[in-house]
Amino acid sequence: MLRITLSAEPSTGAWGEKALLAYSEAGAAIHFAGDYPLRRIQQAARQLQSQGAAQVSLEGEGWSYERQWAFYCGFAATMKSVELKWASIDEDELELLNARRRSADWVRLVVNATPEDMYPEKLANDAIEYLSTIAGDHISHELLVGDKLLEHGWIGTHSVGRASSRSPVMLTLDYNPTGDDDAPVTACLVGKGITFDSGGYSLKSSAGMVTMKCDMGGAATVTAALGYAIEQGLRQRVKLILCCAENMVAGNAYKLGDVLTYKNGVTVEVVNTDAEGRLVLADGLIAASETQAPLIIDAATLTGAAMMAVGTDYNALFGLDKALLLKAQQLSELVNEPAWPLPLEKWHQANCPSYYADTANSRAQKGGGMGGASNAAAFLSRFVDTEATSWIHFDLASCFKDSADSRWAAGATGLGVANIAALLL
């Protein structure tokens, strides 16, 4: 194993004092002094991995929990497993590092899989298997597949997924460690599980479509967040709802101009079949509201507009409960998963009007027009009983990298998992 140590001193090597790494016979030293030391540690780890290091041991002084996690984020690879030995720290922190790594690794495994291998039923079953491994008999579930969705009124998920040869699925998973079947549901997680997004008849370009296996990042994130929270000691009942589909083109695909009538009575005109995530999430949010949980959290790779607003280092937060938004942002800083609130008020619901329905699913403009991320969040708010529950929406702008950069390998990052787990706890 390559031995990795930390140095608070500037580098004195041939590459100058701004160099992140210095090599010796004993291994490599990371010079983290300067602005944003955690980012510097992550960048150094990315350099090590890109140079071919696959087995490292963190040794010496200065390896706090936060610094070790920053190193792991940079060292994790897109498709292969890496071997990392943590530095000696408090036993509780060591358990937390291992649990957090397991959750992040699972997200990478399912999000980075090819769309041929990761389809709606596979995603749902992988989520069941992952959480059952952690929580055992405390997990129960219900799967609704294909036309069974219509029998239960889940029109959005069925409409988006019906053109694929692989059926759409809604998974409702119940984590109930109380032993009481009548125990109240304290929180409900809802995830967008679009395992491939062609855009439907609002067809994406090749450049826009090539990474669309990541469009189930929301489902992966909330699943891993629940697993991570359980490993940290969550002992309250939580339900997980994943709305899974492939958005494809075929003779039976849903079309622009269709009007969908949801289970809560809201009618929606489809003006963009590439604004499909909000259509499936609407089902999940109605189902979540039916549980009467006091907290509903949804997560989705929902809009390019959020990425334009906050970039790819932050997730965007939306909600009508301002105290919950503030809490989520504070927790994001605590777990070093940056997130930032964007505007959302009830009046945003009027920003996607329709002549034929209560609302359209977007505007017939590129990216949904001005304020597209806020308008998408407002669409979702129509399907939550916001008078009876606190609701927060994560638009996961930072959960996936189209290509490698100075800190991350290409693919899933896992950002958002610890933030949502902290909200559950």
Image: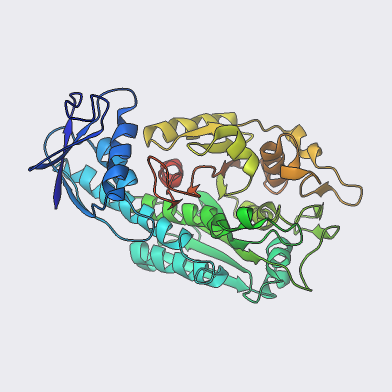
Lateral position of residue 80 relative to residue 373, left or right: left
Q: Measured from the top left, where is residue 287 in percent x and y?
A: 64, 57
Note whether 121 is above or below 243 in the view shown: below
Q: Is 290 displayed left or right of 171 in the figure? A: right
Residue drawn at the location 54% of the way across and 45% of the way down: 396
Q: Relative to the observer, which residue lies in front, 290 or 392? A: 392
Residue found at the very far right of the displayed protein: 355
Could you say where residue 83 lies in the image, as x and y percent from the top left?
A: 22, 56
Residue 9 drawn above or below residue 280: above
Which residue appears farthest toward the front when viewing the image?
A: 14
**Figure check: 148 above or below 359:** below
213 to the left or right of 178: right
Residue 22 position, x and y percent, is 18, 35
Q: Which residue lies furthest to the left in this view?
A: 25
Q: Looking at the image, can residue 53 be seen? A: yes
The residue lying at 46 percent from left, 54 percent from top is: 237
Answer with left or right where residue 3 lies relative to residue 156. left
In which quadrant is the C terminus drawn? top left
Residue depicted at 54% across the width and 52% down the height = 188
Q: How is the image coloured?
A: rainbow
Identify the residue at image location x=56%, y=37%. Answer: 316
Depth order, front residue of 335/414: 414
Percent x, y of residue 361: 77, 50
Evaluate whether residue 388 shows in this view: no
Labels in figure, total: 0
Compared to residue 132, the image places residue 319 above or below, namely above
Front residue (pair 330, 15): 15
